[in-house]
Image (cartoon, grey):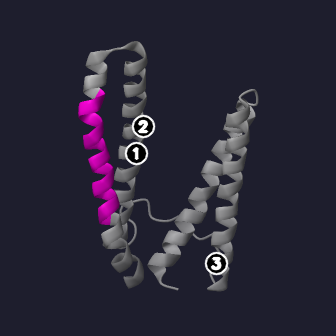
Amino acid sequence: MKDGIAHTLRALHHEEGQPALDLVAVAEQHTGEHEVHHVATDLADWSREHAARLAAYAAGGGLRLDDDTPEPASGQGEGPEGLLLLRALRALHLAATENSLDWEMLAQAAQATRDERLLELASACHPQTLRQMRWANTLIKQLSPQVLTSL
């Protein structure tokens, strides 16, 4: 198995665990909100299933994802340059996604309170944030095949 693919499998296996924990916590904290509780529980199950399926796939290629191998490079000077670029683009995409959600929340609040200035601000800025997300995603799509299969 190519090192870049193995690295990404390890990263995703590790990262699928956190949403499962977070979703379980949300479900437990909001048992009175039935939709939140039940959907969060289902989504947590999906993340656990994803991690199990990743482990099974990797095992088929002789790779153990639950061993003591160090966590994937975080972009702090570890790993090949292409892999670091992918991790940086991933971080940029995630940051833009968080910002997009904040713009969406502000736009919804502006509509609810009839705050035209805030709605105008969100309407002007949110599309640019979406563009940031698309840019990072496009570069990830372009670079991933070459970077992950060349290591």
Determine which residue is flagged by label 3.
57
Give yes or no for contact between labels 2 and 1 (Cβ–Cβ under 8 Å). yes
Callout 1, which amino acid?
A: Thr
Q: Is residue 65 magenta?
A: no
* Magenta-drawn stretch, dominant element (helix, strand or loop): helix
Camera-side residue: 74 or 107? 107
Give yes or no for contact between labels 3 and 1 (Cβ–Cβ under 8 Å). no
Q: Residues within 10 Å of mark 3 (few under 14, many from 20)?
A: some
SS label for mark 3: helix
Which x, y percent locates residue 146?
Answer: 34, 79
Which x, y percent locates residue 47?
Answer: 65, 56
| Disc on the earlier residue, 3 or 1 | 3
Residue 141 relative to residue 69: left or right: left
Relative to 40, does residue 142 appear above or below in the rendering?
below
Camera-side residue: 9 or 69? 9
Question: Magenta stretch?
Answer: 122-139
Residue at 61% of width from left, 49% of height from top?
19
Residue 36 seen in render: yes
Q: Quadrant of residue 88?
A: bottom left
| Disc on the earlier residue, 3 or 2 | 3
Residue at 69% of width from left, 62% of height from top?
49
Q: Residues within 10 Å of mark 1 (few under 14, many from 20)?
A: some
Camera-side residue: 127 or 145? 127
Determine which residue is flagged by label 1.
97
Determine which residue is flagged by label 2.
101
Callout 2, which amino acid?
A: Leu
Which x, y percent locates residue 124?
Answer: 23, 32
Residue at 56% of width from left, 69% of height from top?
10
**Marks 2/1: CA–CA distance:** 6 Å
